[in-house]
Amino acid sequence: MASTWDVVTQNTGARRIRVFIADDSSDMRLLLRLGIGNEPSFEIVGEASDGEETIRLVNEMQPDVLLVNIAMPKMDGLKVIEVVRAANPRTKIVVLSGFDKRRMQPLAFARGADAYVEKGGRLDDLRGVVASV
């Protein structure tokens, strides 16, 4: 199920990083939304629970960063990476996956991902990756 939010913040003059979350787990999307969206330097612009929905909404919203899981219904995250990279070359792609990094990271990078983060790490580390890509 797709979601977008209107975000009201204090104007600090700094541009916020626009982040889109793609994960089939509603609990993971909620955790990411709370953990990243509550930081003043980030704005969560939307989310999707499957690959096809991710492609449609990312094309529409043009986020700065896409956080994408590899294991998703309708279209896996590896294919999502390829399609997003071709259609939205400015969107940075951060894979957030439960799969072993040694096995999946090379596949994700070959398809155009900018970073690979294993699930279960520290939220501060993930924030740092999103801010640095």
Image (cartoon, rainbow, N blue to C red):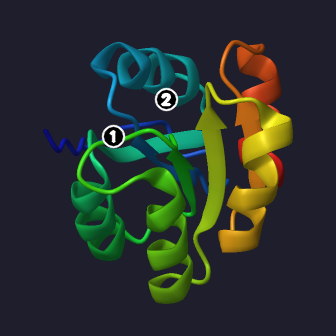
Q: Is 52 situated left or right of 130 in this image?
A: left
Nearer the observer, 3 or 87:
87
Residue underneath mark 2: 37
Question: Residue 93, located in which quarter of the rendered image?
Answer: bottom right
Q: Secondary structure at mark 2?
A: helix
Question: Residue 128, located in which quarter of the rendered image?
Answer: top right
Classed neighbour count for the residue bearing mark 1: other residues with Cα under 10 Å, few (<14), some (14–19), many (≥20): few
Give the image location of residue 120, x and y in percent: 69, 12
Give the image location of residue 111, x and y in percent: 66, 71
Q: Is 68 situated left or right of 28 in this image?
A: right
Give the image location of residue 66, x and y in percent: 53, 54
Question: Residue 102, located in which quarter of the rendered image?
Answer: top right
Identify which residue is drawn at 57% across, 63% down. Answer: 64
- Quadrant location of the C terminus? bottom right
Q: Let me know if residue 27 appears in the view.
A: yes
Identify which residue is drawn at 71% across, 17% down. Answer: 123
Nearer the observer, 98 or 124:
98
Give the image location of residue 71, x and y in percent: 45, 38
Identify which residue is drawn at 24% across, 68% down. Answer: 56
Nearer the observer, 111 or 42:
111
The amino acid sitting under disc 2 is Gly
- Quadrant location of the N terminus? top left
The amino acid sitting under disc 1 is Val
Q: Are marks 2 and 1 in contact (CB under 8 Å)?
A: yes
Among the two numbered marks 2 and 1 on one chain, the one whose residue lies closer to the N terminus: 1
Residue underneath mark 1: 7
Q: Is 130 situated left or right of 93 in this image?
A: right
Q: Secondary structure at mark 1?
A: loop
